Image: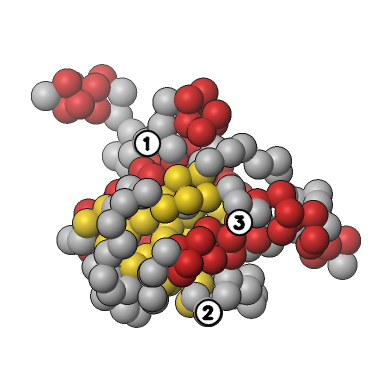
Amino acid sequence: MMERFLQWVFPDVCLGCGSRGTLLCTQCLAGAPEYKAESPNVGACRVYIRYEYVNTIRVALLLLKYCGKRRIAHVLADALVPMLLHRYVAVLALPAAPQRIRQRGYDQAVLLAQAVAQKLHVTYCAGLVRTRNTTAQAHLTRSQRAANVAGAFQWDGVVPQGRVLLVDDICTTGATLREATRILHGVGFSDIDVAVVARGKTNASRSK
Ligand SMILES: [Zn+2]
């Protein structure tokens, strides 16, 4: 009820073109640069990446992450779901650092994962937890990145039987996803696919 009232007073406006009625319209989504390059190496996992981390998609992810625009998660989940080739028993999120979740009051990767799970009609499975804060990865060397995320995750719960989907908002080098899936495989997960909204540029690829 309240939601409807707010929609009436403050209708959604597309963050790309300003058209009314949606947070991100289908035309702006269709015009967003698709990610076509090679996926980062995340062990044996199949990795789906939808967009380049630029322009409208970058703004959408920043609003989702920092500005409490939680409903953008549903628009972006709608963009991820058609890419997926398998069926899953559960959807997981690559969790943000505990300190970040406390600061913002929510975890954008969890919002995305929950939205994807809802659209796939499967369970969202909490259980992957980040045990410590890690620093930003983009400015580190490959070995520094691996050391930075080593041991940063643990699994706390029952391991679902079957293929799962791990969802994140942005990836750059893939080091964090590699470490998370390494931990999951270690506790008995068999097949893990990874879905990411956008890929950011690393320092190495910027300087090329
Ligand atoms: Zn638009």
Q: Earlier in the sequence, mark 1 or mark 2?
A: 2
- Asked whether mark 1 lies closer than 8 Å to ligand 1, one says no
Query: Type of residue at label 1?
Result: Arg
* Secondary structure under the numbered disc 3 in the rendered image: helix
For residue 104, above or below residue 145: above
**Quarter of the view holding residue 83:** bottom left
Mark linked to residue 70: 1
Question: Residue at the spot x=31%, y=23% of the render?
Answer: 10
- Confirm or deny contact between disc 3 and disc 2 (CB under 8 A): no
- Which quarter shows the C terminus? bottom right
Q: Nearer the viewer, residue 183 or 112?
A: 183
Looking at the picture, how far across and down is residue 33, in whole percent?
Answer: 57, 63
**Relative horizontal placement of residue 9, taking residue 96 as reference (left or right):** left
Mark 2 = which residue?
44
Looking at the picture, how far across and down is residue 205, in whole percent?
Answer: 80, 64
Looking at the picture, how far across and down is residue 161, in whole percent?
Answer: 26, 71
- Confirm or deny contact between disc 1 and disc 2 (CB under 8 A): no
- Its colouring scheme is secondary structure
